[in-house]
Image: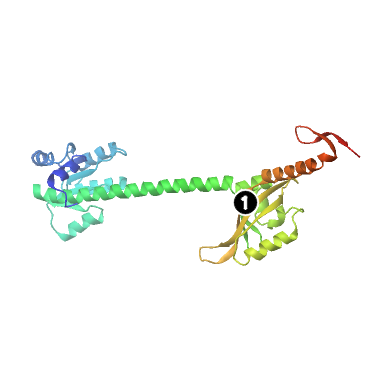
């Protein structure tokens, strides 16, 4: 930041909203003459209590910088700063102090004040401290931007998780095939609620049409820490069925321990129905040379005539 020349520094400080707190009228007049070289927006308070009340009036549109004396009636600058930092612990405060002891300066640091200059207010000391303040403000802006990016990413991640749970047919089991997680999409397609699935063996949805050899192949594959992909016909709670293309793989916890299996499925029921219908049509057409067939709109035979 010290690479900025004075012109650029003033260009940055002119953007700031400042609260200046000083009880002595003559000191205020002289200090404002200096401050006007750097700031266009300056509110003035006559003591710590006045400064605190003005700050509270700002609600969430806080000042960028507070410049304050310490020794003041009603409420001194230190107590005012403590109260302001309770409201907004990010507030930047520049103290103008007559004290020079290390113990007193350490007290300022302890309450969250890292900028101070000694009386009387001088242009060179103010400029030196303003460089540091602008650097702090720019760093805070960068931090805020990073924080906002993280918040946005978290929001997008939450949305993705919600979408995943709603639209992706997913489940997870322990090593014995007992269901430990089921997505909302899995509940919807199977007809079972989450409470009916969790804790149950995964064969709760096994359809009797599926050969046992298919599941043996699946278990042999995933127990070798490999991905298994295959088409599975599952049984719904209401007795119906649905087809899925299943991707099943070993699942590991954060320590890298194998704790179960996870599965993501694609609903291919419509595809399987189309394949079945195409097979029926092909069979019918293959036999059409032996007679006459008339189909309704749903591909059922209305009339038939055979040579035989």
Q: Nearer the viewer, residue 175 or 300?
A: 300
- Please tell me in which quadrant of the rendered image residue 251 appears: bottom right
Q: Nearer the viewer, residue 81 or 229?
A: 229
> Residue 235, percent across and down?
72, 50
Answer whether residue 121 is visible to the viewer in this image.
Answer: no
> Residue 152, percent across and down?
41, 46
Q: Is residue 304 left or right of residue 231?
A: right
> Residue 229, percent across and down?
63, 57
Q: How is the image coloured?
A: rainbow
Q: Give the residue at mark 1.
A: 265
- Please tell me in which quadrant of the rendered image residue 294 appears: top right
Q: Residue at x 82, y 42 (%)?
A: 287
Residue at the farthest right position = 308
- Callout 1: helix, strand or loop? strand
Q: Residue at x 75, y 57 (%)?
A: 211
Q: Is residue 162 left or right of residue 2?
A: right
Answer whether residue 227 is visible to the viewer in this image.
Answer: yes
Q: Nearer the viewer, residue 248 or 108?
A: 248
Q: Residue at x 67, y 63 (%)?
A: 219
Q: Is residue 287 left or right of residue 98?
A: right
> Residue 22, percent across and down?
15, 42
Image quadrant holding the C terminus, namely top right
Q: Residue at x 26, y 40 (%)?
A: 55
Q: What is the total number of numbered labels drawn onto the structure image? A: 1
Mark 1 crowd level (few <14, some 14–19, many ≥20, 10 Å Cα):
many
């Amino acid at each position: 930041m010290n690479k900025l020349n004075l012109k650029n520094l003033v260009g940055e400080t002119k953007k700031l909203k400042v609260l200046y707190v000083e009880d002595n009228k003559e000191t205020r007049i002289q200090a404002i003459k200096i401050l006007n070289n750097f700031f266009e927006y300056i509110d003035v308070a006559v003591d710590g209590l006045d400064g605190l009340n003005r700050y509270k009036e700002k609600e969430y549109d806080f000042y960028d910088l507070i410049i304050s004396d310490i020794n003041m009636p009603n409420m001194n600058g230190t107590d005012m700063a403590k109260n302001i930092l309770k409201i907004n612990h990010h507030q930047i405060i520049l103290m103008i102090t007559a004290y020079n002891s290390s113990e007193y300066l350490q007290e300022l640091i302890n309450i969250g004040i890292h900028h101070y200059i000694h009386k009387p207010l001088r242009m060179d000391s103010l400029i030196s401290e303003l460089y540091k303040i602008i650097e702090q403000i720019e760093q805070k802006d960068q931090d805020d931007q990073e924080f906002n990016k993280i918040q946005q990413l978290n929001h997008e991640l939450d949305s993705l998780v919600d979408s995943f749970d709603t639209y992706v047919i997913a489940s997870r089991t322990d090593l014995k095939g007992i269901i430990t997680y089921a997505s909302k999409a899995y509940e919807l397609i199977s007809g079972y609620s989450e409470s009916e699935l969790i804790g149950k063996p995964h064969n709760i949805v096994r359809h009797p049409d599926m050969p046992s050899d298919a599941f043996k192949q699946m278990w042999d594959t995933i127990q070798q820490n490999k991905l298994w992909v295959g088409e599975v016909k599952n049984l719904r709670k209401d007795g119906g069925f649905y087809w899925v293309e299943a991707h099943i793989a070993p699942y590991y916890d954060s320590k890298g321990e194998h704790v179960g299996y996870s599965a993501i499925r694609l609903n291919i029921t419509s595809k399987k129905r189309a394949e079945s219908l195409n097979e029926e049509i092909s069979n019918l057409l293959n036999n059409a040379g032996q007679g006459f067939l008339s189909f309704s709109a749903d591909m059922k035979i209305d009339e038939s005539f055979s040579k035989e």
